[in-house]
Amino acid sequence: MKYDVIVGGGGPAGSISAYLLAKQGIKTLLIEKERLPRYKPCGGGIPLKTNRLFPFDISPAYEVQAEGAVINYQGIFLTRIQFDQPYGWLVMRDRLDQYLIEQAAKAGAAVMEDTTISGVFEKAETVEVHTGRGSFIAQYLIGADGVNSQVAQSLGLLPNRKTGAALEAEVTVPPPAQQEQRNYLTFDFGAIPGGYGWIFPKKDHLSIGIFQANNRKSPGFRKKLTEFIQKTPVLKESKIAILRGHRIPLGGDYLPLHAARTVLVGDAANLADAWLGEGIFYAITSASIAAEVLSTVLNNPAFSLSVYTERIHQEICPQLQYARKIAAIIYRFPRATSLMTARSSIMQNGICSSVYGDINNEQLYKMMLKRSISILYQTIRGELDSGKESNAG
């Protein structure tokens, strides 16, 4: 059977692409390499601004609604922030991804699970997708198969990706510890150099992890996670049920994200930020753009897929560039920025506004930059105080 569009990958970017296309009556096939539901390492945070992007209600996939956030530094409690409106929701990706794919199927998309893409070949008027279950033909292809995208590799797109690294564990803790965490997100920007540690509550356990925003995983990454656990009181008696590492695609480079008959979306297009490693917001945004562009080109073959890359460069890449700048400040001065966030209601409101979607990364960065002198002052004071303590010893 020949399709109008094949979508390779069943994460949020792929399933939303397939849903939006199928809703328009476009003959769509979604190919997912795993059998669903399948575990996927991910903190599972759905901020309010991301939740607003979904074209349908995703509340059936919610685990927990976030009440607030705790800011720690190297395991030491600094402050607790109470949200004045819904900040976001926590999900398990196996449930979320299955739910999203079900909505795509209900919209009319054909879904093929447990099928791995092995190669992609573009021709004059079609694209041929080779899998372990045979070959499939469509007019166009959306590559939504993650940071290790076979679609991108087959077409020579994004050959030298910038990536960060994350290591995540699903852990059980005693009931008192689960109750102490409540529905609060914990962020610790002293957990690892150039990154942070997190604790996200789920219904019956905690998701914890560390993220480092550089181009390769540093030595002793698992040791850093162990140290993070040991330094964080609520995790003292935790037991790891699942432990997985994965690469995080760090976006912001103005590179081609299309070929003659293919576009890349989400992680496959390297659309995650270098500050928190968050990618679902950009996955949904890019999926919406891809669906718009492919809908147009199917009706007007003279329309160029280059418009897709141009729109990503205009609408997403600048914000990912500013996320890099935010990360550069926070990860260069983790102690000072943690203390400033804990003490400054202006900073807390700015970060919350960013997550709510009321301000963007550019506006948040400029707000932080105005306070850079304060950050430097606190850092210098901290170093001087440490020196005094050493001399006293």
Image (tube, rainbow, N blue to C red):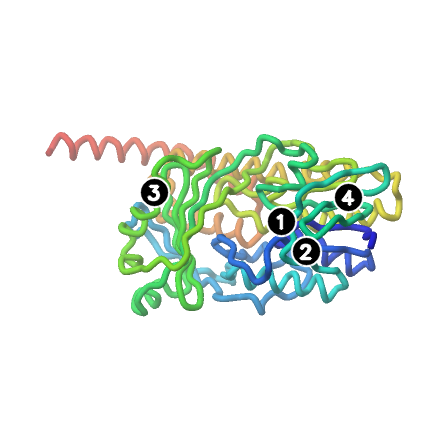
Residue in view at x 63 percent, y 47 percent: 145
Give, as a three-letter code, the residue at label 3: Gly
Q: Secondary structure at mark 2?
A: helix
Q: Pointers 4 and 1 in contact (CB under 8 A)?
A: no
| Lower sequence index among marks 3 and 1 | 3
For the residues labelled 4 and 1, the Cα–Cα distance comes to 24 Å
Give, as a three-letter code, the residue at label 2: Ile
For the residues labelled 3 and 1, the Cα–Cα distance comes to 28 Å
Q: Secondary structure at mark 1?
A: helix
Which residue in the structure is indicated by mark 2? 16
Place of residue 190 in the rendered image (x, y in percent of width and height, measured from the top left): 34, 42
Residue in view at x 75 percent, y 36 percent: 259
Q: Secondary structure at mark 3?
A: loop
Q: Pointers 3 and 4 in contact (CB under 8 A)?
A: no
Position of residue 181 in the picture relative to residue 134 (left or right): left
Quadrant in the picture for residue 174:
bottom left
